[in-house]
Amino acid sequence: MKEQVHYLTDERGNIVAVQIPLTLWERLKPLLRSGGCAEETADAPAPEPLEAFAEFLRYWDFRYPYDPAVKCPQCGHHVADWRTEPGHPFRLANANLGGLLVFHCQKCGATIRQKHFRDHVALESTPGA
C-alpha cells in the first residue's frame, strides 16, 4: 500500500498534500471524527484577529465615535471596554472593514455581532451551544 501513497509538493519541494487510497481513508475517517488519533487542538481558542480590528479602526469614518462596550443579550454580562477588561470576558472572533465585529461571550458562549453602519450600530446575538 505504501506505493499507493502520493505526496504533492510545491515548487520548493515542501509537502502540501498527501493522496491516499480510498480503502485507507475509509479506515482512518472514523478515527478522525472521534478524535482517536487527531491532535488535540480544539481546546485552544483561535487567536483574536487584532490586526483586522486595528485596520477596522484605522479606516473608521462613521458619524459617531467607536464604542468598545460589549453587552451579551443572552446572559446580560456587560463590559465598558472589551479590550482592557480583566479576565477578557468577550473574545473577538471576527473584524472586517465592512463594519462587522463578532464577539464570543466567555460566560454563556453566545455570539454577539455588532454591525456598524454609517449612522448607527445594529446588534444581533445567537445563544451559545
Image (cartoon, rainbow, N blue to C red):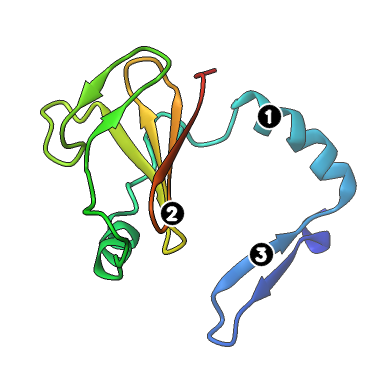
Q: Which residue lies furthest to the bottom in this view?
A: 11
Name the residue rendered at 86%, 53% in the picture.
21
Mark 3 = which residue?
A: 17
Secondary structure of the residue carrying tag 1 is helix
Q: Point out which mark residue 117 bears.
A: 2
Which quadrant holds residue 65?
Answer: bottom left
The residue drawn where x is 81% and y is 63% is 3
For image coordinates 59% across by 87% down, the residue present is 11
* Label 2 vs 1, first from the N-terminus: 1
Judge depth for marks 2 and 3 and give the one in front: 2
SS at circle 3: strand
**Do callouts 2 and 1 mark residues in contact (Cβ within 8 Å)?**
no
Q: Which of 42 and 124 is in front in this view?
A: 124
Q: Is residue 25 above or below residue 19?
A: above
First-in-chain label (2 vs 3) = 3
Q: Which residue lies furthest to the top in this view?
A: 75
Q: How far apart are marks 2 and 1 (CA)?
A: 40 Å
Whether the residues at callouts 2 and 3 have beta carbons within 8 Å, the answer is: no
Amino acid type at circle 1 is Arg
Marking on residue 115: none
- Image check: 108 left or right of 14? left
Q: In which quarter of the image is the C terminus?
A: top right
- Callout 3, which amino acid? Ala
CA gap, disc 2 and disc 3: 42 Å
* Label number found at residue 33: 1
Where residue 39 appears, as percent x and y from the top left, is: 49, 36
Please identify the quarter of the rendering in which residue 46 is found. Answer: top left
Q: How far apart are marks 3 and 1 (CA)?
A: 19 Å
